[in-house]
Image: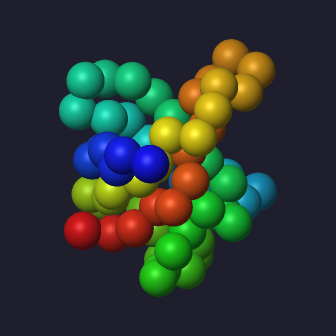
């Protein structure tokens, strides 16, 4: 699967967050998608690499989130 670069937009206390890609597309992610980093270490503004997995409800869901 192809990877995309983005920036963490928001991380919630409920175990999910949102990433914004360079083209402005917003992606939802769950804490289980974090690879090599703890969800608790993520914060808004961090640069990440991720994979698009599927559209879910009104959001696009991503996985394999890695800091870069």
On the rendered image, what quadrant is the C terminus found in? bottom left
Q: Is residue 21 above or below residue 16?
A: above
Q: Where's residue 1, x and y in %?
A: 44, 48
Query: Residue reaching furthest top?
Result: 58
Q: Is residue 61 above or below residue 51?
A: above
Q: Where's residue 58, x and y in %?
A: 68, 17
Query: From the viewer's perspective, is 58 left or right of 50?
Result: right
Q: Nearer the viewer, residue 11 or 37?
A: 37
The residue positioned 76% from the left and 57% from the top of the image is: 14
Q: Is residue 17 visible?
A: no
Q: Is residue 37 visible?
A: yes
Query: Residue reaching furthest front?
Result: 1
Q: Is residue 50 above or below residue 21?
A: below
Query: From the viewer's perspective, is 30 left or right of 1?
Result: right
The residue positioned 32% from the left and 35% from the top of the image is: 21
Report the label total. 0
Query: From the viewer's perspective, is 38 left or right of 30?
Result: left
The residue positioned 67% from the left and 54% from the top of the image is: 30
- Displayed quadrant of residue 60: top right
Give the colour scheme of this rendering: rainbow
Q: Where's residue 28, x and y in %?
A: 59, 39
Q: Is residue 54 above or below residue 30?
A: above
- Displayed quadrant of residue 9: top left
């Amino acid at each position: 699967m192809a990877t995309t670069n983005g920036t963490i937009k928001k991380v919630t206390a409920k175990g999910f967050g949102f990433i914004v890609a360079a083209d402005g597309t917003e992606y939802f992610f769950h804490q289980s998608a974090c690879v090599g980093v703890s969800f608790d270490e993520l914060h808004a503004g961090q640069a990440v690499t991720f994979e698009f997995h599927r559209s879910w409800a009104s959001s696009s869901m991503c996985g394999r989130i890695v800091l870069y």
